[in-house]
Image (cartoon, grey):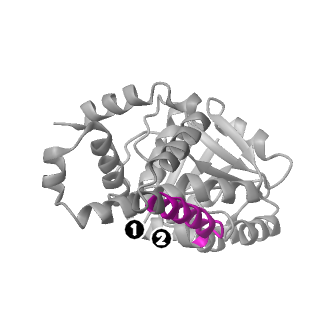
Amino acid sequence: MRVAVLGSSGGMGRLFSRYFLSKGMAVVGFDPVKSGLRSPNFEEAGSYREAVRGADVVLVATPVDRTVKTVEEVAPVLSPQTCVVEIASVKGTVLAPLKALVARRRARLLSLHPLFGPSLGLRSRMKLCVVKTDPGSLARARSLFPDATLIPMSLAEHERQMAVILSLTHTLNLAYAGAVDRFLTPSQFRNVQTPTSGVQLTLAEGVLSQNPSLYSYIQIENERSSEAIEALADEIAELRRMVKAKDRSGFERHFRRLAKRFAGDSETAVDRIYQAFEKSTP
């Protein structure tokens, strides 16, 4: 099988190139910046179109806001039945135009959302959302990623769930870092941190180490993001009200209700926090 990886020098492009190479497939990559990958089964093409010609699978790993433009560029050379794989974090703005482009060439579209980043090791088990584009979506995903955990869902389900998993998480950590910055420098914080606060700041620093263009796209282009952020604001406002009113009983009732709700996930949470803290502490 011949796989074209468009954006082969980026983090996800390199990861998927190495994945397909590990499966014994021939990989042709293109990126304006050379990938530096070394394998007898990998070759660098001179353009996106050159990479795509004759490919059985085309994986688009360009920046998310260039996904549609990249497929527009290569659409004239797509072969019938070619599987075009897109991995955008936000689907609402890309799926409709991609479906139209791919359908005109009688190719097939596979919409995946990798629930991991470029640092994933090849021996790790991949977890992929499979957004249904046609009845064969899940089967195509399974043929390319037989060892992965596949989570099928509709477009609406994807956008709703990612508003929580991505948008809400990013917002919380940005807000946390901004609030900390009003009181303490990072070194002052680290000097007196507890395991819980230290892990939380590490999470915030992890978010801040990412590409702001990608994160702004995830926040703004998902129509459900604002709902998740409003829910967070409501929760913070209620906690603020109880603190200002010195409402300890109300605070404790709220605490116990949530603790009961998340009991299944929290039994070993403190142990995991301490383990993460010890790993992150020099």
- Magenta-colored stretch includes residue 227: yes
Q: Position of residue 67 (x, y in %)?
A: 59, 67
Residue at coordinates 28% horizontally, 37% vertically from top-left?
195
Label drawn at residue 225: none
Looking at the image, is 194 positioned above or below residue 264?
below
- Kindly report the secondary structure that dominates the magenta region of the rendered protein: helix
Q: CA distance from mark 2 to mark 1?
A: 6 Å
Which three-letter amino acid code belongs to the residue tagged 1? Pro
- Magenta-colored stretch includes residue 89: no
Residue under label 1 = 212
Q: Secondary structure at mark 2?
A: helix
Badge 2: how crowded within 10 Å, few (<14), some, or many (20+)?
few
Residue at coordinates 44% horizontally, 48% vertically from top-left?
248
Q: Is residue 8 left or right of residue 223?
A: left
Badge 1: how crowded within 10 Å, few (<14), some, or many (20+)?
few
What segment is highlighted magenta in the picture?
Answer: 221-240
Q: Secondary structure at mark 1?
A: helix
Residue at coordinates 59% horizontally, 40% vertically from top-left?
257
Q: Position of residue 77 (x, y in %)?
A: 68, 66
Q: Quadrant of residue 44?
A: bottom left
Label drawn at residue 216: 2
Residue found at the far right of this picture: 135
Q: Is residue 48 visible in the rendered structure shown here?
A: yes
Q: Position of residue 73 (x, y in %)?
A: 61, 73
Which three-letter amino acid code belongs to the residue tagged 2? Ser
Q: Depth check: 102 or 163 in front?
A: 163
Residue at coordinates 70% horizontally, 47% vertically from top-left?
130
Circles 2 and 1: CB atoms closer than 8 Å: yes
Q: Position of residue 98 (x, y in %)?
A: 72, 67
Q: Depth check: 181 or 47 in front?
A: 181
Q: Depth check: 8 or 124 in front?
A: 124
